Image (cartoon, rainbow, N blue to C red):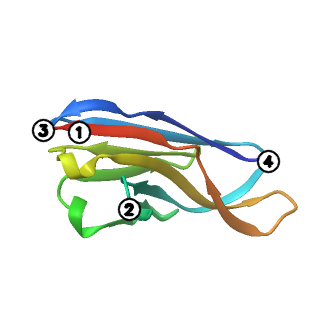
Amino acid sequence: QVQLVESGGGLVQAGGSLSLSCAASGRIASINSMGWYRQGPGKQRELVASITSGGSPNYADPVKGRFTVSRDNAKNTVSLSMNSLKPEDTAVYYCAARLRERGRLERDYWGQGTQVTVSS
């Protein structure tokens, strides 16, 4: 069974920084893309940033220039460095990975979510 486990998050003042990490474990055959989504209060879940297996990042417009996504293919981890945080960044952040579990077809997997709260 595959698991995505997130760490990091918490409470920070506006203008501050936080980092999130996510580790994928289990019977993993291969990992395609990895990334982060978020869901703010009363909002739909949205893409924050993603990164391909080759290391090409993609960012949502609201976080461009402030957030940096990275991954370590050897450790099956993905990280999100968040700078210049704004109150509107407050959300539950979810790690996601498109991967193939051994003996199964490729599909999306999700972490349990971690809260990020930015105070004004």
Snapshot quadrant of residue 37? bottom left
User: Looking at the image, which is closer to me, 58 or 16?
Assistant: 16
Which of the two marks, 2 or 4, is nearer to us in this view?
Answer: 2
The residue that mark 1 highlights is: 118
Q: Quadrant of the C terminus?
A: top left
Mark nearer the N terminus (3 vs 2):
2
Q: Do the numbered discs 1 and 2 sit on residues whose CB atoms are within 8 Å? A: no
The residue that mark 3 highlights is: 120
Q: Do the numbered discs 3 and 1 sit on residues whose CB atoms are within 8 Å? A: yes
Left or right for 81, reference 16? right
Mark nearer the N terminus (1 vs 2):
2
Residue 50 in picture, x, y percent from top left = 43, 62
At 29% from the left and 46% from the top, the residue drawn is 90
Residue 13 in picture, x, y percent from top left = 16, 32
User: Looking at the image, which is closer to me, 36 or 32?
Assistant: 36
* Separation of residues labelled 3 and 1 (CA atoms): 7 Å
